[in-house]
Amino acid sequence: MEYPITIQQGDDNTAYGIIIPDIAGCYSASDEYGNILKNAKEAIVLHISGMIDDGEPIPMPTDSNNYKDDPGFEGMSWATVDVQIDELY
C-alpha cells in the first residue's frame, strides 16, 4: 500500500518533520533528507502493528490530493511510502 506522507522542511538546527495524514497520530522526523522515507516507513509499520495488536481497523491509504486544500499541510512536500500490510499479520 502506498501511503502519502508530508515532509516539513528541516534545516541545520531542525529535523525534517514527517506526517502520515491517513493514519491519525502517526508521525516521525529525520535529521537527514536521505532517511525520510525509511523513517516514515518505520513509523507506519510500528503504528499499524500496534493497531493490529489492539484489534483496530487499519486505515487505507488515500490520494494526497484529498489534503491539497488543508491549510495544515501548506508549504509541505509530498511523497509516498510503500508498506506491505499483509506482512504485518
Image (cartoon, rainbow, N blue to C red):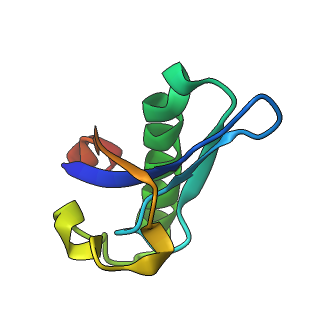
Residue 68 at least partly seen:
yes
| Residue 29: percent from left, percent from top | 64, 43
Residue 62 in view here: no
Number of numbered markers:
0
Question: Farthest residue in the top direction?
Answer: 34
Q: Nearer the viewer, residue 67 or 38?
A: 67
Answer with left or right where residue 12 lies relative to residue 60. Answer: right
In the image, 81: left or right of 36? left
The answer to whether 15 is drawn above or below residue 70 in the figure is above
- Up-down: is 21 above or below 46? below
Image-based side of 19 in relation to 28, left or right: left
- The quarter of the picture where residue 23 lies is bottom left
Residue located farthest toward the right when viewing the structure as drawn: 13
Report the residue at 50% width, 20% height from top.
34
Q: Position of residue 32 (x, y in %)?
A: 63, 24
Q: 87 or 15, which is in the foreground?
A: 15
Question: Residue 36, position in %: x, y?
Answer: 50, 33
In the rendered image, residue 31, in percent from the top left (x then y), is placed at: 69, 29
Q: Which of 60 and 9 lies nearest the eye of the viewer?
A: 9
Q: Is residue 68 left or right of residue 49?
A: left
As drawn, which residue projects farthest toward the front?
75
The residue at 71%/34% (across/down) is 11
